[in-house]
Amino acid sequence: MGDKHKKNREYKKGPHLILIGFMGSGKTSIGRGLSYKLQRAFCDTDKMIEAKEGMSVSDIFRTKGESFFRMTETEVLRSIRDDSSPKIYSLGGGTPVQLQNQPLIKMCGTVVYLRITPEAVYERLKGDTTRPLLQCEDPLGRIKSLMAQRLPAYERCADIIVDTGATEREDVMQDVINRLRESGWNIP
Ligand code: S3P
């Protein structure tokens, strides 16, 4: 097998901690908490995209369309892959779905999937207006169908799966830290 193919298959891991999961699974809040505990910078890819485009995610969806947003997500992932200084990154809920993003995500670092039920997402995001995909007649139905479509992608990308939703934020953070230690991370 040529070196190029070998490299792609092995997904040499970068130094980052990558948080993935459905909208409302707590990636941002857990990421901020872990940033303090692990003394690492935290970045949220939605915020990176908003800064790059100079507008909110909702406005990007409205004026430039979802496919433009998805292209920008892939560009941002490439920049994370090329960032050699260890950080914590939280990815948008749809980022792992695009096939070309999956090897990129794995190359960025250790991937933690924050797993949550559709009902818990619904309770957390009731009344939220910042997620364009959930501005519809039946948000719970939309959450259920999107989650069913996305589960295999989340599982494919994950190195570690941690349940969230019914658990306090501190306990979720502790679970993540314990699982990172088990997988060889040196956390004091
Ligand atoms: C999306 C999730 C959002 C944001 C955009 C699309 C998705 O991020 O990227 O609204 O497709 O699930 P969060 O998961 O941080 O809410």
Image (cartoon, rainbow, N blue to C red):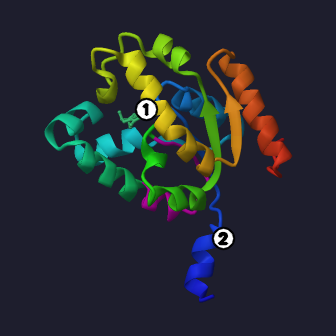
Q: Residue at x 33, y 15 (%)?
A: 138
Q: Which one is earlier in the sequence, the residue at label 2 or at label 1? A: 2
| Element type where label 1 sits in the image | helix
Q: Are marks 2 and 1 in contact (CB under 8 Å)?
A: no
- For the residue pair 6 and 130, the one nearer the viewer reads as 6
Badge 1 is on which residue? 146
133 left or right, relative to 101? left
Disc 1 Cβ-to-ligand 1 distance below 8 Å:
yes
- Residue 87: say if magenta: yes
Amino acid residing under circle 1: Leu
Badge 2 is on which residue? 10
Which stretch did the figure color magenta?
77-91
| Disc nearest the viewer among 2 and 1 | 1
User: Height in image: 20 above or below 156?
Assistant: above
Residue 108 rendering spot, x and y as whole percentages: 57, 58
Q: How many marks?
A: 2
Query: How dense is the environment of label 1, judged by Cα within 10 Å: few (below 14), some, or many (20 and up)?
Result: some
